[in-house]
Image (spheres, rainbow, N blue to C red):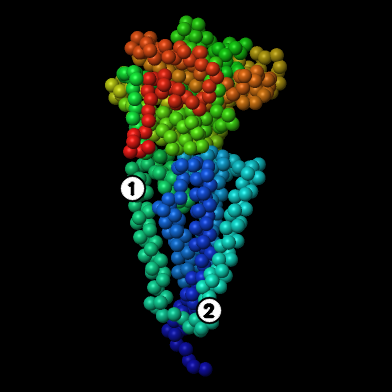
Amino acid sequence: MANVSPTQDKKQAKGAAYAVPWPIRLRSYSYVGIFVLLVQWTAHYFAASKLPGMYLFTPHIIFAMVVWALVAYTLSVIMPYRVLRRGVAIVHIALYSVLYLTDMHMLNAYQTPFTDSMAFPLLATNPGEIEAFLSSSTGRLGTYARYLIYLAAIGVISGVAPTVIKYLGRIRCTRCKKRTPGRWPRLLLPGALVLLIGVGFVRHAAPILKDYRNNWLWYNSMTLPDRAFFSYKMARKELFWSYSNNVPTPTPARAYNIKTEEEQGSYNLVLVIADRIYPALMHCYGYEMPTTPVIDTLSSLGLLHVETNLRGAPNAASEEAIRNMLSSATDKSAYLASPTLTTLLAQAGYTTYWLSNKPKAEPWQQGVPRPETECDSVLYTHLRGSAEEWWASPLYDEAVLNHLASCTEPPLQGAPLLQYVHLCGGRESIWQRVPNRLQKFSAIDFNDRSGMQDNLGQYCNIIYYYDYLVGKILRRYAHTPALILFIGSTGAQYNPHPYTGENIPEDQLNQIPFLWYISPELQRLRPALYRRFLELKQVEVWQADDLTNRLLSLLGLSYRPTPATQ
């Protein structure tokens, strides 16, 4: 037996790492690239079917999918050891499977793919928030069964791909198994793949990075891994932005010709949106308990008007209902392709401001409404919220009172102001929403002393607190030109009522509160506006989904896309 030197031993050991010939290796790991490509294709297909007109198969998207597939394939091929190659392949398959299933959950639950607004709960520091996010699909496995079947089918197709490639290409590796290819043949194909990937990333990633630096991302131009990475980065950036004047106004995707039938002037347009405020328990809507003394007094004086003909969006969660009512889209499945109230009034010369007492990240985060991200300024009175934190720092809605803005005060003087005020209202937990000084009702005020009546008493306290806030907000703008709208997000859609346990009339199901106030100063400046609002009482029942278009008409505005963007 010939003597083998230590140097030769090292060379042989090094060569053993590349013992698998390149033709076999290139064919064997083709399943990784095919799996990644098909998963991206399938995820984008469902996004396009859920949001028609927004998520399309453009050449840019297809090219990006191919590049990501080549990344997974190349990394699996060029690893020196078999265990590393298999490990890289398994990591890619697991990662893309998780991203795919997450996207399917987002599309079904919230009608949006995974974006920065969905990354907030995962970035929160409370582990309970992550558990609530990941378990939110519990009990709905049947809904996702077909997506699991599709994922399994993709795995089968990818698994048989190497065998198909072998026979279609008629690859014979009998001779090549006896030798190890030289350095240049061994590096030529991987080098070409790396070059192609590099070119692809420059063409695809450069515009995305530019948008990211400008704090505005177009998720419909991204593939699945793009959205996963940049949504995480954008969420971290947004989560730690300072609260005020730090969300820039994005350049609108379209420009609109805003037709002004009436001079807008400088005034305050305040839209107060409160979650889960039910008219059936408001005295101003006929409830027997005196839950709305301020509203009743102002209404009797003719200052505040109570409308009874507004109904909420059917089968919609609070954030989805807000998203729909602030969009001009008549087909809500394509709402992203239509301008929001924020966009239209901004192009009409309004300054826009979103003020929210709803935490930016919480266990039940359902996404940030699109009109919020389009505002000139955004302010959260609470960054995070959880059941544990409510005990130490209750999310009382009166926190917004010190942050209300006005067009008559610096630095907003001159232009009309659109201000959204988003209140928690009756969101859980109702037991931590009302300060002790305003807890007027309890179970003793009702005949039945059951647990349901305990909840009913506390919910009446929420209505009583909301009535108090209405008075405070009106007092803030009483001496300015102001139009103030108070509106709920969702109504009680089914009988019995969730708090009274009693049936409500069929014609009042899904009713949401709608109150409006026009200050004496604005009545003087714009009498036609006041007359149009008075005519609302003659309107038959209408849906909150039509709020944006109806409000534009009341304001004396209309719009259409410019010819270049139609």
- Amino acid type of the residue that numbered disc 2 sits on in the rendered structure: Arg
Q: Is residue 90 above or below residue 555?
A: below
Which residue appears at 48% of the width and 92% of the height?
A: 3
Q: Residue at x 61, y 46 (%)?
A: 144
Q: Quadrant of residue 475?
A: top left
Q: Which mark is residue 210?
A: 1
Horizontal and vertical percent position of residue 464: 55, 16
Q: Secondary structure at mark 2?
A: loop
Residue 277 x %, y %? 55, 22
In the image, residue 392 above or below residue 197: above
Whether the residues at callouts 2 and 1 have beta carbons within 8 Å, the answer is: no
Give how far across and how far down residue 99 sits, in percent.
52, 51
- Taking the image as shown, residue 289 lies to the left or right of residue 261, namely right
Q: Is residue 360 above or below residue 515?
A: below
Question: What residue type is disc 1 on?
Answer: Lys
The residue drawn where x is 58% and y is 61% is: 157
Q: Position of residue 540 (x, y in %)?
A: 54, 17
Give the residue at mark 2: 172
SS for callout 1: helix
Residue at the farthest bottom position:
1
Q: Nearer the viewer, residue 483 or 393?
A: 483
399 sits left or right of 507 in the view: left
- Whether residue 254 is visible to the viewer of this picture, yes or no, is yes
- Which residue does the image show at 48% across and 37% down from the upper left? 334
> Which image quadrant is residue 116 in?
top left
Mark 2, other Cα within 10 Å: few <14 / some 14–19 / many ≥20? few
Q: Mark 2 or 1, which is nearer the eye?
A: 2
